[in-house]
């Protein structure tokens, strides 16, 4: 499975990449913000996107809105520090499939990926 990992923090990307690799995912592309991710999507077609909310240039919510204007099927998991209920609802309305709060246990990420991909296949 191809995964696009979008986070402005190099450390956060490294941690998430390590967790994803521990879970058996090896085809991982990284982007440092939403705009970088949009550019990468011209050549990289992920099966799943993990995106942070708070980033410069184009934040995660802006990315999701732009991405969903042309792609309604690729699952998106928002992985962020944002925990306020209104923010979670805003992200889901924008097109996020599920939400995961940092920091998270590797088992929880695995569970969210499995649930998200199962729901996407069923749809």
Image (tube, rainbow, N blue to C red):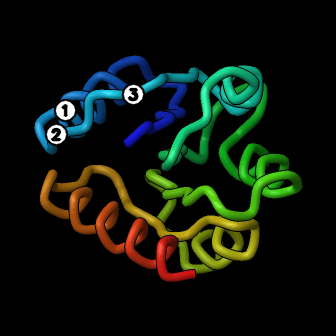
Separation of residues labelled 2 and 1 (CA atoms): 5 Å
Residue at 49% from the left image edge and 49% from the top image edge: 48
Q: Is residue 72 above or below residue 54?
A: below
Specify the quadrant that holds the N terminus: top left
Give the mark count.
3
**Front residue of this view, candidates 44 and 64:** 44
Residue 40 quadrant: top right
Residue at 63% from the left image edge and 33% from the top image edge: 55
Tag 2 near tag 1, CB within 8 Å: yes
Specify the quadrant that holds the C terminus: bottom right
**Front residue of this view, candidates 59 and 20:** 20
Instruction: Give x and y (percent) for residue 16.
Output: 29, 35
Residue at 54% from the left image edge and 44% from the top image edge: 51
Separation of residues labelled 1 and 3 (CA atoms): 9 Å
Among the two numbered marks 1 and 3 on one chain, the one whose residue lies closer to the N terminus: 1
Residue 12 quadrant: top left
Q: Is residue 108 above or below residue 122?
A: above
Q: Secondary structure beneath disc 1?
A: helix
Q: Secondary structure beneath disc 3?
A: strand
| Label drawn at residue 24 | 2
Which residue is disc 3 drawn over?
28
């Amino acid at each position: 499975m191809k995964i696009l990992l979008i986070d402005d923090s190099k450390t956060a990307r490294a941690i998430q990449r390590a967790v994803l690799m521990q879970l058996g995912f090896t085809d991982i592309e990284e982007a440092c913000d939403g705009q970088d991710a949009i550019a990468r999507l011209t050549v990289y077609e992920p099966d799943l996107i993990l995106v942070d909310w708070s980033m410069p240039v184009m934040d995660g919510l802006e990315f999701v809105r732009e991405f969903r204007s042309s792609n309604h099927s690729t699952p998106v998991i928002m992985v962020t520090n944002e925990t306020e209920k209104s923010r979670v609802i805003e992200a889901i309305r924008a097109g996020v499939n599920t939400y995961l709060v940092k920091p998270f246990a590797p088992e929880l990420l695995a569970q969210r990926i499995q649930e998200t991909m199962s729901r996407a296949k069923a749809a």
